[in-house]
């Protein structure tokens, strides 16, 4: 089962790959801050599958206003004329909340034999990120160049690489004793970004 935010639509090719490589996928659009949307998503899922064995929560996406090309402090950040680090910090806070919630939920559900883990993706190209990371001729935008310079593997991720991490976490033999972790699939970006 796959919950997908309004910012990400599961492409048919991705759904086929998940079906053949992991399991049957059901893309469900759900705004996680709208209770009616969450309840509707739950209804859609339970109609398809009365019992859920695996939940992959793909909710997320950046707030467009939190994306910046600032690399250093600018005076406008203090007078409210720019959308600088005061607002960008919420993205980092939300990511930490996901990690903390994953760890807490893993401890809470471990006695029931339920493992809870998270995957922290790096930069993957999709319809939205291409506009931010690439130029019209396929080269790197200034932001794309900055990301690549701070990614030790020197490239963006590919969908199958994310699926590999997810397959490992879902494997009841290979990851049977793994719970409460967040696996970065980011080409080393998290450890060396400096952004």
Image (spheres, grey):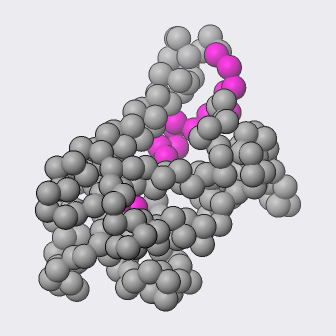
Q: Which is nearer the eye, 175 or 142?
A: 175
Q: Is residue 45 visible?
A: yes
99 over 60 or under it: above or below = above
> Magenta stretch: residue 105 in it?
no
Residue at the spot 52% in from the left edge and 43% down from the top edge: 64
The x, y position of residue 33, in whole percent, is 26, 50
Magenta stretch mostly in which secondary structure?
A: loop
**Which residue is pictured at 66% across the width and 60% down the height?**
157
Does residue 71 belong to the magenta stretch? yes
Horizontal and vertical percent position of residue 61: 46, 52
Q: Residue at x 44, y 80 (%)?
A: 22
Q: Quadrant of residue 82?
A: top right
Residue 12 in view of the camera? no
Q: Residue 186's spot in the image, x, y percent? A: 61, 51
Q: Is residue 32 left or right of residue 145?
A: left
Residue at 68% over, 20% down: 72
Q: Nearer the viewer, residue 91 or 118?
A: 118
Q: Is residue 101 left or right of residue 15?
A: left
Residues rendered magenta in the picture: 57-73
């Amino acid at each position: 089962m796959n919950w997908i935010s309004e910012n990400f639509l599961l492409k048919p090719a991705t759904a086929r790959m998940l079906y053949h490589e992991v399991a049957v996928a059901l893309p469900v659009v759900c705004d996680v801050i709208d209770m009616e949307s969450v309840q509707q998503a739950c209804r859609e899922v339970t109609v398809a599958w009365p019992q859920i064995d695996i939940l992959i929560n793909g909710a997320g996406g950046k707030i467009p206003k939190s994306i910046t090309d600032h690399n250093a402090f600018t005076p406008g950040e203090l007078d409210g004329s720019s959308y600088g680090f005061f607002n960008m910090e919420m993205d980092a806070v939300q990511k930490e909340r996901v990690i903390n919630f994953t760890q807490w939920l893993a401890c809470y559900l471990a006695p029931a034999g339920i493992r809870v883990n998270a995957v922290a993706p790096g930069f993957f190209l999709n319809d939205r990120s291409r506009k931010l990371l690439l130029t019209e001729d396929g080269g790197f935008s200034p932001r794309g160049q900055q990301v690549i310079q701070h990614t030790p593997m020197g490239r963006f991720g590919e969908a199958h690489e994310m699926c590999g991490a997810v397959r490992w976490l879902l494997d009841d033999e290979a990851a049977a004793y793994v719970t409460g972790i967040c696996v970065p699939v980011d080409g080393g970006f998290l450890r060396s970004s400096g952004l």
